[in-house]
Image: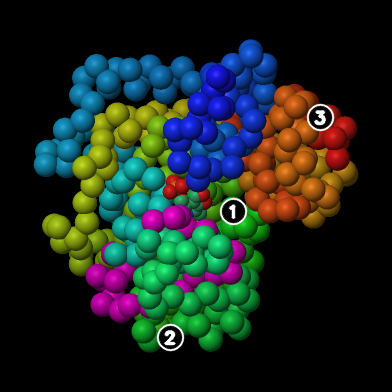
Amino acid sequence: MDWIEREKRVILQTYTRQEVVIERGEGCYVYDTEGRRYLDLVAGIATVSIGHSNKYLVERVKEQLEKLIHISNLYYTIPQIELAEKLSQITGMDRFFFCNSGTEAVEAALKFARKVTKKKKFVSFTGDFHGRTMGALSVTHKEKFRMPFMPLVEPVEFAEFNNVEDLGKKVDDSTAAVIVELVQGEAGVYPAKEEFVKALFELRERYGFLVIVDEVQTGFGRTGKWFAKDHYSIEPDIMTMAKAMGSGIPIGCCAVTEEVAEKIEAGDHGSTFGGNPVACTASLAAIEYIEKENLVENSQKMGEYFVEQLEEDFENVRGKGLMIGFDVGDAQLFVRKCLKNGLLVNNTSERSIRLVPPLIITKDDIDYALEVMCSLK
Ligand SMILES: Cc1ncc(COP(=O)(O)O)c(C=O)c1O
């Protein structure tokens, strides 16, 4: 019996997987159990930013594994404090709560928003994806994901993404927070418009709600700046992060301003694993590597090049940095054809392809990917 048959017997079938068993990775490439090589333009869904099995990260994590693996938040640990200090430099936020995934970061954000404002309503947007636990799912737009699990957290209203007028109708004095993806990822890579973001922050002034910017997918250089918020020169009240934060080692974070932090007390939230020394060390190593190798700049430059080249052959090319979307006739078929030809890409809808490669990608890798994709469309 092969691995795929074995999986089908024992794993709960919540995922639609590609027909391949990936065994190892190096840089931008991964290898299956037959030894076939693939250029990875998915990077574990915008996660393995500094490349597969990055040697610097591996060494740092190994050292930490030998020192201390886990102790919980009953005690102080050094990597957690160092990581928070580093994050405060690159995010401009003041205080950090660590968790283990994106959906957990969103859960924390929603709880903090209610605690701080003493209000109940959340406003999210059409197309937004924020995770699959009950709170995060409540502010995730897709009905197929939400409906089987009703009732979820209420009240929640969805305003049309990039529609200032509709947003104005949905927020009011009872709004605790508006949660937004500045570049929608799961919806197919759609950036928020400048005037829309500006209007959101003007409405914040009028009604006093908090703005939660969900940077789970867009963070850590993905969009050609450290964070998507840096494209808009805004100061969110709360920011969520995960995915590329540990470049593949699970870690998430909910960052807040000092004003929010002042109203959060011991016991308001917690996590056994959150801020674990191994995960925090991985995140520190990933951030240091991004800084050392100028990967934010590489993301911006390579992203621009990739988009320019894609525009010659594909429709509706969009994105920021190395977060890129474009349309094809049949996206599922295109993904399967790419796989057969040594390329991992991902579809977000029937027509839409998403590319979120490691930030270390080179022009040669991109040229190779373009050659394969153009021959298959
Ligand atoms: C913007 C955004 N928020 C939250 C999540 C949930 O993250 P996780 O899958 O780590 O729970 C995702 C995952 O795709 C995401 O893209």
Q: Amino acid at mark 3?
A: Val
Badge 3 vs badge 2, beta-carbon distance below 8 Å: no
Give the percent coordinates (x, y) of residue 276.
26, 35
Give the percent coordinates (x, y) of residue 240.
41, 54
Q: Which residue is at 81% across, 29% downward?
A: 372
Q: Nearer the viewer, residue 160 or 358?
A: 160
**174 versus 176 height, above or below:** below
Q: Which residue is at 73% across, 35% downward?
A: 336
- Sequence-first tag of 3 and 1: 1
Q: Is residue 82 magenta?
A: no
Give the percent coordinates (x, y) of residue 63.
29, 17
**113 versus 285 height, above or below:** below
Res 128 quadrant in image = bottom right
Magenta stretch? 112-133
Count of residue discs:
3
Q: Is mark 1 within 8 Å of ligand 1?
A: yes
Q: Is residue 244 left or right of residue 17?
A: left
How far, Cα to Cα, is label 3 from label 1?
24 Å
Residue position marked by numbered label 2 in the rendering: 172
Does the image show residue 239?
no
* Residue lying farthest to the left in this orientation: 74
Q: Is residue 215 left or right of residue 308?
A: left
Say few, some or many: other residues with alpha carbon within 10 Å of mark 2 (under 14 / 14 to 19 / 20 or more): some
Q: Amino acid at mark 2?
A: Asp
Element under label 2?
loop
- Sequence-first tag of 1 and 2: 2
Residue position marked by numbered label 3 in the rendering: 372
Residue position marked by numbered label 1 in the rendering: 186
Res 151 quadrant in image = bottom left
